[in-house]
Amino acid sequence: MKKTLTISAAAIAAAIALTGCSAGTGSGSSDSSSMPGMNHGSSGMPSSSAPAASAEFNDADTMFAQMMIPHHAQAVAMSETMLKKEGIPATVTDLATKIKAAQGPEIEKMTGWLQSWGQPTQMPTDMASGHSMSGMMGEEDLANLEAAQGTEAARLFLTQMIAHHEGAVMMAKTETSDGKNADAVQLSKEIASSQKTEIQEMKDLLATL
């Protein structure tokens, strides 16, 4: 069920639509270690309300945010699809509500970081074609989820979202090891931890359906 797709224009457009104009920068201390050849200086004008450390980033941080935004956007869209359906077990709709509530604000946070770093919120097309995001669903997968009803839809959603979360965990672990920005690295750790917990929760739910 695992899938790896190159970044699609549709996924990126959905992510940008979700973020609106919101931008925020978290706080944290600087991590002085970084991958050789991956350092950027501070890009863009530093925010007077944000610590200087938040402006320190490298290519891994940029790629993490640019790829995780559309990845999260698809998870939110899949959750919204489920929340529109009738006859879905309450445990599954509760999970979909939780995923949407958690990942929507994370999209806004990462968009804010990219803006504060002076980086595009979308990965340039020439770079996007050479990178892929594990766990992304294809158009056929999403169409099947849209068409499914009741218990069938619940099973499909859980199966797809497990693969989707597993992809996000892989991306988060890469950021944890390669990133420089303290806030981005912290978010990557939180994503890996929370989504691994949800993966187990979804496997348990699948066993009951």
Image: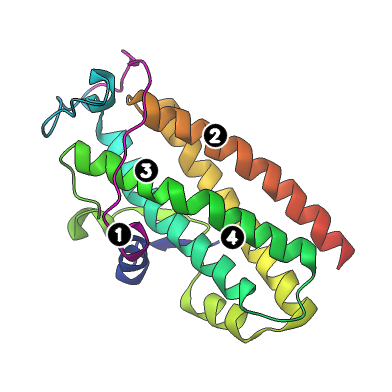
Can you identify the residue that label 1 sits on? 20
Q: Residue at x 47, y 64 (%)?
A: 74
Q: Which residue is nearer to you in this view: 190 or 166?
A: 190
Horizontal side of residue 183 vs 150, given as left or right: left
Q: Neighbour class for label 2 at 10 Å: few (<14), some, many (≥20)?
A: some
Query: On the image, numbered disc 2 is attached to which residue?
Result: 190
Q: Mark 2 and mark 4: span between their CA atoms?
A: 22 Å
Cα distance, mark 2 to mark 3? 13 Å
Farthest residue, direction front: 49
Q: Tell me whether circle 1 and circle 4 mark residues in contact (CB < 8 Å).
A: no
- Density class for disc 4 (Cα within 10 Å; few <14, some 14-19, many ≥20) is some
Sequence-first tag of 3 and 4? 4
Q: Secondary structure at mark 3?
A: helix
Residue under circle 4? 2
- Left or right of 149? Residue 109 is left
Q: Secondary structure at mark 4?
A: loop
The amino acid type, in three-letter code, at marker 3 is Lys
Q: Which badge, 2 or 1, comes first in the chain's sequence? A: 1
Q: Which residue is mark 3?
A: 109
Q: Earlier in the sequence, mark 1 or mark 4?
A: 4
The residues bearing labels 2 and 1 have C-alpha atoms spaced at a distance of 23 Å
